[in-house]
Amino acid sequence: MYEFLQFVSSGMTVGAVYALVALGFTLIYNASDVVNFAQGEFVMLGGMTTVFLYDAGTPLWLAAVLAVMITATVGVLLNKLAVEPARGASVVSLIIITIGASIFLRGVAQIVFDKQIHRFPAFTGEDPITVAGAAILPQSLWVLMGGAAIFGVLYLFFTRSVIGKAVLATANNRLAAKLVGINTTAMMTLSFGLSAAVGALAGVLATPITLTSYDVGGGLALKGFAAAMLGSMGVPAGALVGGLLLGLIEAMTAGYISSDYKDAAAFIVILTVLFVMPRGLFGRAVAERV
Amino acid sequence: MRLSPRTWTLIILAVLIALAPVTFPSAFYFRIGALIFVNGLAVIGLVILFGYAGQISLGHAGFAGIGAYSAALMPMHLGLHPALALFAGAVLSGGLAFLIGRPILRLKGHYLAVATLGFGILVFIVLNNEAQLTGGPDGMAVEDLGLRAVSDALGLGLRTAEVWYWFMGLVLLLGAFLALNLHTSPTGRSLRSLHNSEVAARTLGVDVVRYKLTAFVISAVYASLAGSLQALLNGFVTPDVAGFLHSIEWVTMAVLGGAATVLGAVFGATILTALPQALTVFQEYEHLLLGLIIMLVMIFLPAGLLPSLGKTLRQGESI
């Protein structure tokens, strides 16, 4: 039993990171219909910037805050310099642009930082806590609580604040949002900034456990995209469920079957779900307009 | 006599393949040329899938992996000649595409993208993990196709890299010829009709499911052949041939060149195969520049390099 609990706790931790990456995909997709494959690079930038600021003598909390702000700026720049000028390009062209951006950001990180693997100390100690026989890292709790807090704050933002509702309106129908006086261009920029900040936060929370280097973004983007699709692209609750499910499947496969095939299990589940529910777990049927 | 665009495309390709070696200072360039043609072949397959039928795939390197490891494993375990293994791999890939195509192609847009991506990754994982058969991440050696021996027997006096260059050039021309024929055939017209609107195509009596599957199987065979040929050319294969990055590279080549045309496919393959080789002189700035160039091309020439250049040229003429 304690073995099962152990797998659940590690699966939830990894899953929370996937869920945050998937949420990043969802935020940008909703505002702009762009699937941003540079999403993983936001996570990398969050982790790497914190590492280098911390090593330079900045207190950890300040390094983390600065890292999130810097990454959010990168997200805004990505929108302003690469996505906005290509407005009206096909979906595949926009995907290629974000793939180009992810290669570019990786190249920049390799020069500004380095090619080593890094970490910084856990926020509150490295000694595992024992719960019902399962050892849980305190940092795992930080990831889970942090992830829950981010989802909670964003939920309140989108349902209670005027700006949040304006973003939702833009996501729903851009033309209609424009007609009622919403600055949709600004909402897109805000979404990119928010999405980058969420990614960076995931990087800051997870780095003490998962470590980071300039090239961790690609794998994370893949898993985050898969999680977002599993839970239906564009649905925040879907991102949460998809991410956690993916993490749990991986942990259970690694624990009970073979760690070599944990990624395979995740994708087999995704394919099976999509064959049965072609629009993901939370998708609604949409009629195609001719 | 007026030549059709199809004939023009083939003539342009043949002339470029024939004349390019004039500028080659060393055998290394023939090797790069052969690699460009290998990628070009796979990207022509993707043009049939994206450009004709409008279906996206982020997992076609999976078929390349099947092709590559067929060429590596079948001669070793079944005693097949590598040339036969290449065709056996293509049959295997086509069959698999037929089986998984039906459920996968029910999906649309990004859901189709993630499903094909998942398929490619599954192939990669199997190749990577079944180390006793495939050698795992370290890869395995591939038997010689015997092209040099044929060339020597004919008394052509060509070096190995040169033999491969001319052989792949011919294969690419053949691949382009078949794709161009398909474009104007009834099947090609049906494919292009469902690209514009599936509902409209269905209303006109096009069997949408069948034609999507046809395009998927054809493009899988192209990818498989490209994978086999790449393995035979290198004499070595690693699971990376089936990797996600390889799929993405091919998609980028197709879109960068201009997704709807055969010539664009070869152009995209040329740029993205040669560019990383050229950028290695910039050492650690290599990735930065590659990413930057991809972004700039797609921002300023969203239809792809070749169609955009063609448009500029035509405008120039009319002025």
Image: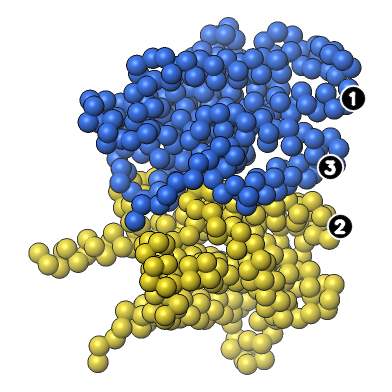
Chain colours: A blue, B yellow
Residue A252 place in picture, x, y as percent: 80, 35
Residue A279 place in picture, x, y as percent: 54, 45
For the residues labelled 2 and 1, say whether their Cβ atoms are less than 8 Å apart. no
Find disc 3 in the rendering and name its residue.
A258
Say above or below: B65 vs B2.
above
For the residues labelled 2 and 3, say whether their Cβ atoms are less than 8 Å apart. no
Residue A286 place in picture, x, y as percent: 45, 46
Q: Which amino acid lies under the numbered mark 1 shown in the image of this protein?
A: Met
Numbered disc 2: what chain? Answer: B
10 Å crowding of disc 3: few (<14), some (14-19), many (20+): few
* Residue at far left of view: B319
Closer to the camera in the image, B230 or A82 = A82
Residue B58 is drawn in which quadrant? Answer: bottom right
Find disc 2 in the rendering and name its residue.
B132
Q: Measuring 40% from the left and 61% from the top, which residue is drawn there?
A: B199
Say above or below: A286 vs B146.
above
First-in-chain label (3 vs 1): 1
Numbered disc 3: what chain? Answer: A
Q: CA distance from mark 3 to mark 1?
A: 19 Å
Quadrant where the C terminus of chain B is found in the figure: bottom left
Numbered disc 1: what chain? Answer: A
10 Å crowding of disc 2: few (<14), some (14-19), many (20+): few
Look at the numbered disc 1 and give the secondary structure of its residue. loop
